Image (spheres, rainbow, N blue to C red):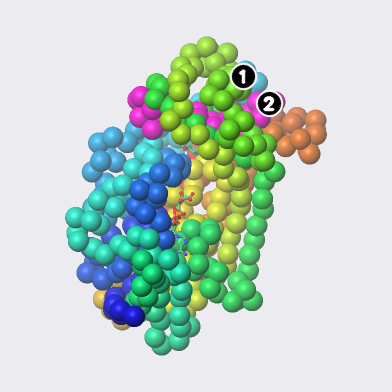
Amino acid sequence: MTTQRTQVAIIGAGPSGLLLGQLLHKAGIDNIVLERQTGAYVLGRIRAGVLEQTTCALLDEAGVGERMHAEGLVHGGYELCFGGARHRIDLHGLTGGKRVTVYGQTEVTRDLMAARASAGLTTVYGAKDVALHDFDGAAPSVTYTLNGEPHSVVCDFIAGCDGYHGVSRASVPPKALSIYEKVYQFGWLGVLADTPPVSHELIYSNHERGFALCSMRSATRTRYYVQCPLHDKVEQWSDAAFWDELRRRLDPQAAESLVTGPSIEKSIAPLRSFVAEPMRFGSLFLAGDAAHIVPPTGAKGLNLAAADVRFLSRALIEYYGERSRAGIDHYSEKCLRRIWKAERFSWWFTGLTHKFPETGAIGQKLQRAELDYLVSSRAASTAMAENYVGLPFEA
Ligand code: APR
Ligand code: PHB
C-alpha cells in the first residue's frame, strides 16, 4: 500500500471537484482529486449550459474564466412559449442589470481540467474501490485501487464531490441523513446538433403535447429538448422523429424557422428533486450533485454546485489561514438555505411548463392561467427573473 498525504482529498472530477481543487490550489491548499472514470468519459457527458453571474465570477476567481468570456453567449432574457405565441422575460431589465452566460458545462469541465493539468496538480483517473475512513475521527483517509494496486491518501478533510451515485453520501450512516426526494414521471430527450439556433435566446415551451426547450452552445451548435415518457429508449427516437416533435411544440414562426440536421449526441435524462441533509459529517463535506439534484428546468444544477464550492473553499481557506472553524461549522446550513430556494424554483418552473396528465384538464387550465399572469404582471415576471439569474448569497 502506497500512502500519500494531502490537506484535502477530493472525490470526483466533475465540475464541483475540479473547481474546488482549483480554488484551494490558488489559496495554497494542497489537494488530490480521485475520479473513478477516465477524463475522456467525464468530458463525454453533455449537461446543461446556463451560468449565473456569480458562477462566472467564481470561474474567474479560479483563473479559468478566459474562454468562457470569449466564447460564452451573454443573454439578457429568454422566451416563454405557450398558446402558439412567445413572450419575452427581460432578465436584464427586471433584475437591475443581471444577465446569464450560455456556456456548456462540458466546456467548464474542460477548462478546469486544463488548468489543473497545467498547474501540475494530481488527479487520479480510473481510481476504483474508493473508500472513506474515519471522517468522524482524528485521522481521516481515503483508500482506492489503481490498476489493481492499493493506495491510501491521508488528509485533514474529505470533499465528497462524486455526484448523485457517488460513494461519499453512501458512506454516511443512513440514520445521520435526512433525504427529501421527488421523482418525476417523465424524462427529457436531448439532442445536440450543429445547426444555427432557432432564436438568439432560449425558448421554454409549454405545449399540450409536452414541454420543449430550445437552447444552444454557440451560434452554430444547438441543444434542444422535448419532454418524453420516462421509459422511452433513445433508439426509439430517430432524428426525424425528434425534429418533428420539437417543431410541433413550438409557435408557428419558430417551427417555420427551425433548422434541422443530424444529431451529434442524443440522450434521455430522468428528472428528480433531491436533497440530503446535512452536508457535513465531521471532516467530510458533500458538495454538488452528491448532496442535491434539481430537475433541469432553469439550469440550476451546475450553479448550485458552484455555490457549494464557493462556501466550502472559503471555509477551508479560513480554517487554514486563521485556524477558525466558523465557516466549516456553518457550511451545511449556509448552503442549504439557498439550495432549498433553488429546489423550489426548479420544481415550480418544471410544474409550470411540463405536461402532467394526472392533473387533468383543470391542471392545464390552471397552468395556462399562471403563464398568462406571469407574462402580464411585472411583479410575477420579476420574481421569476430574479430566481433565474440566481439569488444573492446571504451574508
Ligand atoms: N469514486 C470516484 N469518483 C466517483 C465515484 C467514486 N465512487 N462516484 C462518482 N464519481 C465521479 C463521477 O464519475 C463524476 O465524474 O464523481 C464525479 C461527479 O461529477 P458530477 O456528477 O458532474 O457532479 P458535480 O461535480 O457535483 O457537478 C454538478 O453536474 O450533474 C450535473 O446538474 C449537475 O450541473 C450539475 C453538475
Ligand atoms: C441546456 O442548454 O442544456 C439547458 C439550458 C437551460 C435549461 C436546461 C438546459 O434550463
Looking at the image, is 142 positioned above or below residue 53? below
Residue at coordinates 23% horizontally, 53% vertically from top-left? Answer: 115
Closest to the observer, 329 or 226: 226
Percent of width and height locating residue 110: 31, 47
* Element assignment for label 1: helix
* First-in-chain label (1 vs 2): 2
| In this picture, residue 359 sits left or right of residue 212 | right
| Residue at the outermost front position | 148
Where residue 209 is drawn, which disc sits there?
A: 2
| Residue 96 painted magenta | no
The residue type indicated by label 1 comes to Arg
Looking at the image, is 321 positioned above or below residue 262? below
Main SS, magenta region, reads: strand
Classify residue 106 by image quadrant: top left
Residue bearing the label numbered 1: 248
Percent of width and height locating residue 92: 41, 34
The segment highlighted magenta reads 205-227
Using the rendered image of the protein, determine whether residue 339 is visible from the camera's viewpoint. yes
Closest to the observer, 108 or 170: 170
Task: Give neighbour class at mark 1: few <14, some 14-19, many 20+ (Cα, 10 Å).
Answer: some
Percent of width and height locating residue 246: 57, 23
Quadrant for the N terminus, please. Answer: bottom left
Classify residue 348 by image quadrant: top right
Quadrant for the C terminus, please. Answer: bottom left
Quote the CA–CA distance across marks 1 and 2. Answer: 8 Å
| In this picture, residue 221 sits left or right of residue 290 | left
How many numbered discs, if any? 2
Closest to the observer, 251 or 185: 185
